[in-house]
Image: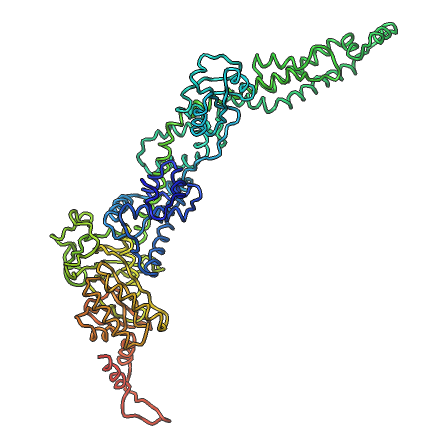
Amino acid sequence: MDLESIPGVGEKTARALAELDDPERALRTGDVAAIANAPGISRGRAARIARAAIRREHDDPGGFLATDRAREIYRELLELLADRTVTDYAAQRLETIFPSPRQSRIEDVRAFAADALEREPNPDVLDALEGVSSLDRPRDVRVRERCLATTDAERYSEAREAIPELSVEIVEDAQGLAELARGYSTVVAIDESFAGVTVEGDVRVEPDALETPAETVPERPLAFFARNRDAITAAIDVHRHAGLETDCDLEGLEDALSRLETDGTVAGDDELDRLATAVDDLDAAVGTAESVANDHLREAIREEDVTIEGADLLSLVERGAGVDSLLSRELSDEYAAAVTAAREHLIESLDLESGEAEIARRIFADEPTFPVEREEEPLGRLREELTGARERRADRLKRDLAADLADQRDHARQLVQDALEFDVELAIARFAADFGCTMPEFVWDGEMRSGNGVSGDDDGVSGDDGVSGDNGVSEDAPDGDGIDADAGPRETGFEIEGGRSPLLDEPLERIDPVDYGVGGVALLSGVNSGGKTSTLDLVASVVVLAHMGLPVPAERVRLRRFDSLHYHAKTQGTLDAGAFESTVREFATLADRGAGSLVLVDELESITEPGASAKIIAGILEALSENGATAVFVSHLADEIREMAGFDVTVDGIEAVGLIDGELEVNRSPVKDHLARSTPELIVEKLAEEADDEPIAANGGDVRGESVPGFYDRLLEKFE
């Protein structure tokens, strides 16, 4: 993949992406977390890059969400989906699922979503997901006690690039290797010319070292698994609780991880623990052993009666002898016992083996001294012996464990990736369950039965329209960009049965289901607070989710593929001249090039005076009808607009059944070809039904000739 061909990705960003382990996979799958691991790329930028890569793959021009309100609907739906994720990855991954007009992109996500709907979330899986996160790539691995050696400058550059964790040194000959061995615990010679050379120290000749980095620097795979051990272990739990299939040996991987400490060292080896403890405790143990010997001697001296005759004392003084000579002559047995106690304490406290113990005994000399003091030379030898043994043991264990884990790296990555993707699937499944969703049926070529409303067929699917009854996708429909300009306007749009808007802040069971369908253009009338705006929100939510490839909140949905969604929310107050002009320009462009668009408008009449509004809306509807767009305009001027329109515009109505205790009782599903009564009309009708024949008193009690019911009847006549 040419990374710079992705919109918004320049040379610098392409270089950063190229540092990822598998940039093509990350971009292809929308792995925002992996993309964000590239140097200098934030998570927000990573999401934008992923979306751009997906759009490029499907030739998606973008701009499906054409208005601020359309984008708000998408963000609200995305937030509802993200609320049902457990991992940060899943929330970020959902950012790459966006509404698209391209059939190929919609079908890709539909296939993913169809599998997701088969998932059954359970508490154990959700708990395990809490510990899963995107894998981190360690960048700070550095091994200082080991180096690579070569005589060739080109080989030197190759080694530095292949194994940056180790220092690379240039030497001229075997003597150079010997000198390096004095400064490094291990020297790995990577030239074939060194084969058979014998050098003092730990020098290994491995010409293929650069081809087997896991053996040469086992810290590399160990650092990766140590850094990501918790995430991998949690992913193992997810697979077990969810019953997910995997090629990975879960037991083998789990066992290998149990032998790895968080700092990349090997755990659970008794011999390595013994050596490490001996090195760490050596100085303290020697100090304690000195105290043991000196305490023993002090006690012996206190209890011993030492008599020295004058001649003996004179002889000792003449020879320059001191207290050591006195100890040797008078307390030799006690000194030997003290030294023996010190040696035994040191050997036992450090749990030394025979060879190590032999060196340890030399730390305390046989010649009597007081106080008893350590011998630095054998102490240094013991330290070197223990340290070398520890490093050799650790190196061997690292190599063995790295060999076990190195082949599991790809499996572990896939294990974690599958667990994270499973969280995305669960989020979609949980969203669908919470809002009663189903997969919508698409009509890719734009053909739907003529007329407005939901089909009266039993299954709502025409037997010859190319729509599959299994998944709602036409198997032979072309992936077009909208309605063919030469085909003329078509009655196309959407049909919703049992829809419940997920944007309502109400429990699902308290939301009245809505049935509504529109082909072509329609006016939607209805009482205040009757649900007209909620109906537009429902339609917008269904269309956005459907074009994301996700399930929609309804019992059944059938719709065409739209090129864009234009949702104009209700304006607050009359617009000034400049804003009014801008709004009219926007609709002029839409009327000219909006053939494949869905246009939802909420009370456009509020932009200017009612009389002018009706004329403008009528003209907009005429243009949209002529170019074959699908549109729903909510308006309280439906009757006036219908009279001014140059075609037979459909007027649907959300009908209020009546008033109960001052509250409207409404049939939330719009009635086709019906101008809904207004709230004032309902109130007047209610007053007329409840009124008695008492006359109206006015002007100090003068009685008019008209009764109260008659007054209400006159008002009702005005609504006819």
The quarter of the image holding the C terminus is bottom left
Left or right of 78, for residue 110: left
Q: Residue at x 21, y 59 (%)?
A: 493
| Residue at far right of view | 310
- Quadrant where the N terminus sits is top left
Give the percent coordinates (x, y) of residue 178.
53, 16
* Residue 579 appears left or right of 651: right
**Residue 531 seen from this side:** no
Res 134 → quadrant: top left
Give residue 457's position: percent from left, percent from top. 14, 57
Q: Nearer the viewer, residue 474 or 535?
A: 474
Residue 496, image x and y in percent? 23, 58
Nearer to me, 573 or 687: 573
Q: Which quarter of the figure has residue 280?
A: top right
Left or right of 58, for residue 465: left
Q: Is residue 715 visible?
A: yes
In this view, 509 is above or below 369:
below
Say how many tags the image has.
0
Q: Nearer the viewer, residue 423 or 20?
A: 20
Residue 110: % across, % down? 26, 47
